[in-house]
Image (tube, rainbow, N blue to C red):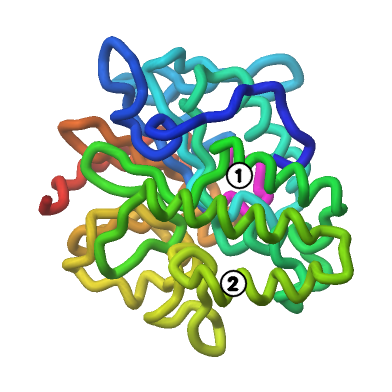
């Protein structure tokens, strides 16, 4: 994301929806959110498929324990925002994501923008000072903008039954249009990186594209916030069907049409608790690591259309 990779750009519709992929059978979607630089926890979560008898692995351990793509074209992996900041392994998490993008078939690893990835685009907009996101070099910020333009990083991704977005929205939205808007905003920022107008363009872009970047209230997470900031508290049960992260939970939970999967930070001081969401056309399942290393499976009923 910040250093670039060799993978070709992902264009619509593959960029925006699993239904745009050309595979013999519909690939299962695996999503993980809010890694926040906690690499061991992310590894544990992604290996839950390997460790459950009902699933083929999506990744496997290679040399030095690094995760390698093992899913062929049977899986799509969604990193559903906030992969960086807070934890001790930010560089390693970014390297893992870049490696899996390069190893997987085109369009089979998707990254949605979280509010902490937004910090890479708009570091002057925040007062985060010591966090990883706001201390990227101009070259890394430009590489991140290129990843967005190339379709590797999106605002949202459409699954079979739900849309994947870091924080979500209360009313329906067009994923392709939102991703086009995201690219437009990112390119405005990218063109100003390193210039005297950098900070001013960050400010104006946040204001110009509120559905993507918008903050609301003193914490930014209020009911009128954008798709990377809205708090789960303000998503009513009749919101569009979505899988979100952003708001901390101890276990993946469902409220009406919305599933929140942000569990790593609430469990990273304990044994177990890491989890992923797995979606197929027929069902949505949570796979969670138990304290004894076993993997527990929980099937959610499908949201209303």
Residue 286 lies in the magenta-colored region? no
Percent coordinates x, y for residue 80 in the rendering = 48, 48
Q: Which residue is found at the position 72% from the left and 34% from the top?
A: 95
Mark 1 or mark 2, earlier in chain: 1
Q: Residues within 10 Å of mark 2 (few under 14, many from 20)?
A: many
Q: Quadrant of residue 22?
A: top left
Percent coordinates x, y for residue 83 in the rendering = 61, 50
Q: Quadrant of residue 85?
A: bottom right
In the image, residue 34 sits, relative to residue 212, either above or below, namely above
Q: Which residue is found at the position 75% from the left and 67% from the top?
A: 123
In the image, residue 41 sits, relative to residue 64, either above or below, namely below
**Badge 2 element:** helix
Percent coordinates x, y for residue 159 in the rendering = 30, 39
Camera-side residue: 160 or 211? Answer: 211
Camera-side residue: 47 or 217? Answer: 217
Percent coordinates x, y for residue 148 in the rendering = 60, 44
Q: Which residue is found at the position 61% from the left and 42% from the top?
A: 149
Marks 1/2: CA–CA distance: 16 Å
Compared across the picture, whether 47 is left or right of 40 comes to: left
Q: Residues within 10 Å of mark 1 (few under 14, many from 20)?
A: many
Q: Which residue is mark 2?
A: 206
Camera-side residue: 88 or 33? Answer: 33
Q: Specify the farthest residue to the left.
A: 304
Q: Which residue is mark 1?
A: 148
In the image, residue 62 sits, relative to residue 246, either above or below, namely above
Compared across the picture, whether 237 is left or right of 148 comes to: left
Residue 290 is at least partly visible in this image: no
Camera-side residue: 114 or 187? Answer: 187
Compared across the picture, whether 273 is left or right of 103 comes to: left
Please give the range of residues in magenta: 34-42
């Amino acid at each position: 994301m910040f250093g670039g990779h060799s993978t070709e750009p992902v264009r619509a519709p593959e960029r925006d929806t699993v239904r745009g992929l050309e595979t013999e059978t519909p690939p299962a979607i695996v999503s993980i959110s809010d890694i926040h630089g906690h690499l061991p926890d992310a590894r544990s979560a992604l290996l839950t498929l390997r460790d459950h008898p009902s699933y083929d692995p999506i990744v496997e351990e290679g040399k030095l324990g690094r995760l390698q793509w093992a899913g062929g074209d049977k899986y799509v992996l969604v990193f559903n925002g906030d992969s960086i900041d807070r934890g001790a392994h930010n560089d390693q998490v970014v390297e893992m994501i870049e490696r899996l993008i390069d190893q997987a078939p085109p369009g089979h690893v998707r990254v949605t923008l979280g509010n902490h990835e937004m910090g890479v685009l708009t570091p002057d907009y925040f007062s985060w000072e010591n966090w990883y996101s706001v201390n990227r070099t101009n070259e890394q910020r430009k590489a991140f903008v290129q990843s967005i333009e190339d379709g590797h990083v999106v605002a949202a991704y459409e699954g079979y039954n739900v849309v994947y977005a870091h924080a979500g929205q209360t009313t329906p939205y067009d994923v392709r249009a939102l991703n086009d808007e995201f690219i437009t905003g990112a390119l405005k920022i990218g063109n100003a990186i390193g210039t005297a107008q950098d900070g001013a363009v960050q400010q104006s872009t946040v204001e110009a594209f509120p559905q993507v970047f918008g903050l609301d209230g003193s914490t930014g997470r209020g009911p009128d916030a954008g798709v990377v900031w809205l708090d789960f508290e303000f998503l009513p049960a009749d919101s569009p069907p979505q899988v979100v992260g952003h708001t901390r939970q101890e276990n993946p939970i469902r409220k009406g049409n919305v599933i929140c999967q942000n569990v790593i930070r609430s469990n990273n001081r304990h044994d177990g608790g890491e989890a992923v969401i797995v979606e197929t056309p027929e069902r949505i399942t949570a796979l969670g690591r138990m304290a004894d290393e076993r993997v527990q499976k929980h099937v959610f009923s499908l949201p209303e259309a």
